[in-house]
Image (spheres, rainbow, N blue to C red):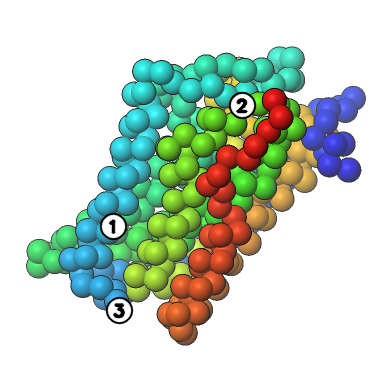
Amino acid sequence: MVNWMLGYGAKDRHIETALATFLCLSVAVWSVFYTDFLNHTPSIESVVSSDYVSDEILALFRTACAILSLITLGWIVFDPKGAPDNPLYYKDRKNHPRHSKGFTRLAAFTMWHFGLFGISFAISATCSWIHISGGDVPEWMLIASPALFATTYACAILVTFVVSYHLIGDSIKKKYNLDKLFCWYEIVMHNFNVILMGIAIILNNFEVDWRYFALPIIFGIMYIIWARIYVSIAGVYIYSFIDPRLNGAPIIHVILLSILVVSFVIVKLLELISDWNIIAGIIIITILNAMITTFKQPETDY
C-alpha cells in the first residue's frame, strides 16, 4: 500500500491533490472566520507573565530563542560550504544528489517552521519588553503571540516526528549520507525546537485556544503552495512525498495536514496538563520529546 502511494501510475494526481488541498484550506479559512478568534484579545497577564519566573527572565528566554532562530537560519544561508541534499527532480521523477548554497536552502519546511519559531518568540519577547518598560502592548501582538505559539509548536512536533520516523529511515534505505541530518543546525531545528517549545509552554501563561487548530493547517498549505512555486524555479521537490503526481498524493497531503491537527491537539493537552499539575506536565513533555527526537546518528553499513 505504502509503495503504491509513493509510486507513479498511468495517471498523475494533480487535480485530485489540488481539490483535496483546497477543501482542507476552505475548511480552515471558514473556521477562522466562523470562530472569530482574531477579534478576541487575550489578557496582558496571559501574554507577558509567568507563574514560575519573573517577567524579565521570561523576556530573556524569549529573546534568546528568537536570536537562536536568526543565527541558525543565517548560518544556513551564509555558510559558504553549503550542504548536500537529495531532492526529487521534477522531470525524471527521481532523487538525485545536489549541493545547495544560499537562500535556496531556506526552501525546506524545516527552515520555514524554524523561521516561524523565530517570529513567534520575537513577537512574544517584544510584548514582554514593552510591558517591562511600562508601555502599552499593541492589541495585534496580544492576539498574535498565543496563536503563533500554538502554530509553531504544532509544526515543530510534525517536523521532529517526520524526521525521526521517516526521513532518517528513508535516507538509510536509499543509502544517502546521514551527516547532513546531524549537523548542529539540523539538530537545533529537528530536536531543540520541541525542547524549547516544551520549556516555553511551562513558562508561558498562554492559553492555547482550541480555535487555533486551523492555523497550522493554513501554514502547512502555504508551504505546499510554495513547494509548487519552488519546483518551477529550481526544478525539484525537496520532499519527494509531497509531489502531487504520486498515486497517493491526495491521501498523503490530507494525512500530513491531519498530523498537524493531531500535533495541535497534543499541544492543547500539554497546556491543560501543565495548568493542572506542573510536575505532570514536565514529565509528559519530557517523555514526548524523548519519543520523537533523535540526537544520535544511526550506524549504517555503507
Q: Return the mark for residue 62.
A: 1
- Identify the residue under disc 2: 177
- Identify the residue under disc 3: 51
Mark 2, Cα crowd under 10 Å, few <14 / some 14-19 / many 20+, is some
The amino acid on which the numbered mark 3 sits, given as a three-letter code, is Asp
- Dividing the picture into quarters, in which one does residue 141 lie? bottom left
Q: Nearer the viewer, residue 1 or 285?
A: 285
Where is residue 289 shown, x and y percent of the image?
A: 53, 60
Location of residue 286 with respect to 126 vertically, above or below? below
Using residue 184 as the reference point, say whether residue 11 is left or right of it. right
Mark 3, Cα crowd under 10 Å, few <14 / some 14-19 / many 20+, is few
Where is residue 14 shown, x and y percent of the image?
A: 75, 31
The amino acid on which the numbered mark 2 sits, given as a three-letter code, is Asn
Q: Nearer the viewer, residue 48 or 301?
A: 301
Q: Return the mark for residue 234.
A: none
Q: Nearer the viewer, residue 176 or 268?
A: 176
Q: Are marks 3 and 2 in contact (CB under 8 Å)?
A: no
